[in-house]
Amino acid sequence: MDELGTEPQQKRLPNYLLDAAGISIERMPMLNVIFDRMAASCTDSLQPMAGTPCYFSVSGISNGRVGDIIKEYEGNALAAVLYAERWDARVLIMLDRDFVFTMVEALFGSDGAEPPIDVERAFSNIELRLVHVLFERFAKALQSAFAATADVTFRLERVETAMASLAIGRSGNMSICANIMLQALYRGGQMFLIIPHSVLNPLRQKLAHVVVSDGRAADPNWREQMESEVQRTEVTLNAVLDERMITLDDVAKFHVGQVLELDATPRTLARLESNNQVLFWCQIGQLDGYYAMQVADPVDQKREFVDDILSR
């Protein structure tokens, strides 16, 4: 009998050893990128909904046992169980009370003048329904964050208020816990994303290398439509040959037939403006019986700013 075993068994042996050792966050830098992307996606997703800016940021990533993390927030959080069919696994998203109450106030137009809620009470039906919508958006944000690493879809399976019902494996199983902070209305809250090690182990090789986007548009159809709409957009242009400052008294004395003298000459360049923004310096002339503008020089915005300051 061969003591070293067959060649396929030898190749699988390092993987078995790594699986037994658990997930090392330092050896998987792509995890930081994924959670940062999720935080940024959450910020963008809630911007149209909230009447006040809401910012999400990753404050830390740690290893821990699922049971210990859940037990710490018993009765003080809402949790969602997300099912990933491709992995046949579940992950958790937990929101503490401060997070829930802050988001409720932000989404209903509060300006933060009222003190935060400091009463131990059950979550209302309105709060639960609103949090359900938030969990769906967070699931899409997580799915988008994983897109560069794994083609996976997260489906919101259920929302729980009792932490004892959050069974996604044995309570002693190790997991990754990402702490994402919310800042809004001069207060905030915490979101906890819990992913078991068993889910991440098959992705260990991909998570060991940071994948940087090449910057190309992910949806070429959207890009083409955007370019088409921009090119079709109508803008109003104004040509200004010369300006002079006069008093309101002089304006009141205007009469029919009066000639207003300008300092412009036939060689003076007119400036072409749009929405009070100078675009080009142009030569003015006639073409087929109409006034015409020929672009002579683009406008240097920095130079124009400096000249305007020096002339005062």
Image: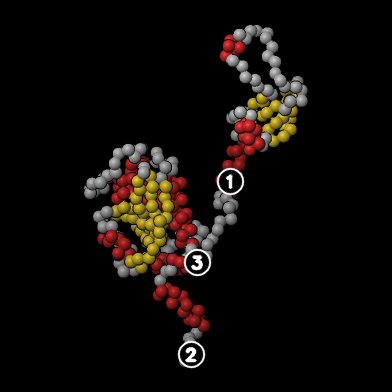
Give the image location of residue 47, x and y in percent: 43, 43
Q: Which residue appears at 25% of the width and 46% of the height?
A: 118
Circle 3 crowding by C-alpha within 10 Å: few under 14, some 14–19, many from 20: some
Is residue 240 visible to us here?
yes
Seen from the viewer's position, the closer of residues 295 and 2 is 295
Q: Which residue is mark 3?
A: 208
Per the image, label 2 sits on a secondary structure element best described as loop
Going by the numbered disc 1, the residue's amino acid type is Arg
Give the image location of residue 200, x and y in percent: 43, 66
Instruction: Give whichever of discs 3 and 1 has the lower sequence position.
Output: 3
Q: Which residue appears at 42% of the width and 69% of the height?
A: 23
Q: Is residue 291 left or right of residue 164?
A: right
Q: Is residue 309 left or right of residue 187?
A: right
89 up-or-down from 9: above or below:
above
Going by the numbered disc 2, the residue's amino acid type is Asp
Instruction: Give whichever of discs 2 and 1 has the lower sequence position.
Output: 2
Q: Which residue is mark 2?
A: 2
